[in-house]
Every structure is written in structure tokens, then in C-alpha cells.
Amino acid sequence: MTLLSAPPRTDRTTAGPAPLAPAARLLPALAAVYRAQLARARVARIPLLFVATFQSVGILVMMRGVVEAGQSSAARSVVAGSSVLVVAFVALNLLAQYFGKLRATGGLDHYATLPVPAASVVLGTAAAYASFTLPGTVATAAVGAVMFGLPLGQLWVLLAVVPLAGAALSGLGAACGLLAPRQEIATMLGQLGMSAALLLGVLPVDHLPQPVLWLRDLLPSTYGVEAFARTFAPDPDWAMVLVDLGVCAGVGVLSLGVATWAYRRAVAR
């Protein structure tokens, strides 16, 4: 009887799990998220801009009955505050609602499966929402300048004010949406933030009590309002304009960093 011999052994290494694809770099991933968000919101862009701009122009009309036209600090504050309010409506209010909805409905799981850094998701979405605000902000500023008799020559400063104030407010809105335990609370926080930007940014500083002024200094959009309002002066103090814009930039980096941390925390839970 022939004994069956075992098959010869071959030198085989134990197959391990296939390596994962390398994660996308920050800037290409950010650009991809930005384009995707722009394409997603393209249908809602016109109504969004209309609502934000109509609201701010309506506030200008209302304040025109209270504040006289001319080169007064009150007129400059009203026009600058109403213009930046367009940014607050979209970047703070709507972004808080958007991330709150994603967190409540499990939409963050889609982004968690993508090989993209967390910062690119937050920054790309925030940049897309802030981009919607530039046309409405310019239109509001032009209408307000004509209504209150202010010069139109410095509206180009909005090219710096909108992205910097938008970054600060977008980070704050995203953090509110991602940290809120419920979608309704995220919506409430976004509404409260926009109301604060309205009351503390549009109302003339001379009419506010000191405790309210302290709260105003804590609001990121305040420094965008101050930077823009200074440019309406006959002889603008450009050094202080740069200081205000620098504060906006610093708060924007901080708030977007907090929003990125909140995104990682929400995805990991």
C-alpha cells in the first residue's frame, strides 16, 4: 500500500490586509469639497442671496428713519453693519443649520468614509457658503452708501472684509452645528448668532451701554464692521483698518480650528 505523501510545502508569506490608499492632501481635498458644495447649492443660490440681501436692505430703510444721512459715525456703522449682516446670515446662521442637520441625519458618515482631511471638509464647506455672500454684500453696501450719502470709492475693501469676516463667522457657525446635541439647538444657536450680529453690528455704537459694548467686542463680525466703517471716513485710518482685518483673520483661524476639532469629535462618536 502506497502512503500518500503530503504536498510539498512552498515558501508563502501570510497575506495581510491590502494597504489603504493614501489620504488626499489638504489643498486638493479642500478644492474638491468646495466645488462639490458650490454645485450642490447652485439651485438655492439666487433665493439665498435674495433673502439675505433683502433683509439687510430692509434694515437700511428702517434705520434711515432714525439716523440722518451724512458723514456721521452712526451712518457709517449702519451701512457697514448691514453689509456684514449678509455674511452673518449665510456663514453663521445657515452653516450652523447645515452642519446640525448633517450631524442629526447621519450625513457626516459620508464624509467620514472619504480619504480627505477633516480640515478640508470644514474649510471647503465654509468657503462655499461664504462665497455666496459677496454679491449681496456689495449690493447692500452700494445701496446703503447712496441712501446715507457716503462715498462709494472704498467698496473694494469688501474683497478683504467678506472672506475674513466670513471665515470667522463660518467657523463659529460650523462649530455650533457640530457641537449642538440636537438639530433644533443648532438652528437656535445660528439664529441667536445672527441676531447678535444684527443688534451689535448695525446699531450705532454711541447709543449702546458699556456692558453691551463688551459683548460687541467678543463678536467676530464686529471687527469686519469696524474695518469697513472706517473706510467711509474722509481720511480713513488705514492702519486701524489693517488691525481690524488682522483680528478678523486671527479669530477666523481660531474658529475654523475649533470647527475642525468639533468635526473630528462628531465623526468619531
Image: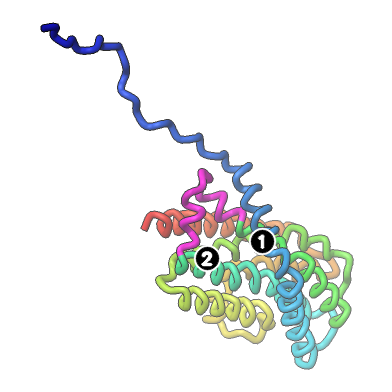
Give, as a three-letter code, the residue at label 2. Answer: Phe
User: Where, quadrant-wise, is the N terminus in this rendering?
Assistant: top left
Where are the magenta residues, as a range? 106-124
Q: Position of residue 115 (x, y in %)?
A: 51, 43
Q: CA distance from mark 1 to mark 2?
A: 15 Å
Query: Position of 153 compared to 63: left or right?
Result: right
Contact flag, marks 1 and 2 (Cβ < 8 Å) = no
Q: Position of residue 4 (x, y in %)?
A: 17, 11
Q: Which image quadrant is residue 90 in?
A: bottom right
Give, as a three-letter code, the residue at label 1. Answer: Arg
Q: Is residue 23 above or below residue 185?
A: above
Residue 242: within the magenta?
A: no
Q: Is residue 205 above or below residue 113?
A: below
Query: Position of 214 compared to 227: left or right?
Result: left
The residue identified by callout 2 is: 99
The residue identified by callout 1 is: 40
**Looking at the image, which is closer to me, 110 or 195?**
110
For label 2, the crowd category at 10 Å Cα-Cα, with few meaning under 14, some 14 to 19 and many 20 or more, is: many
At horizontal 50% and vertical 35% (from top left) the residue drawn is 22
Residue 116: within the magenta?
A: yes
Colouring chosen for the image of the structure: rainbow
Q: Which image quadrant is residue 160 in?
A: bottom right
Query: Position of 83 compared to 179: left or right?
Result: right
Q: Is residue 166 above or below residue 82?
A: above
At horizontal 65% and vertical 66% (from top left) the residue drawn is 223
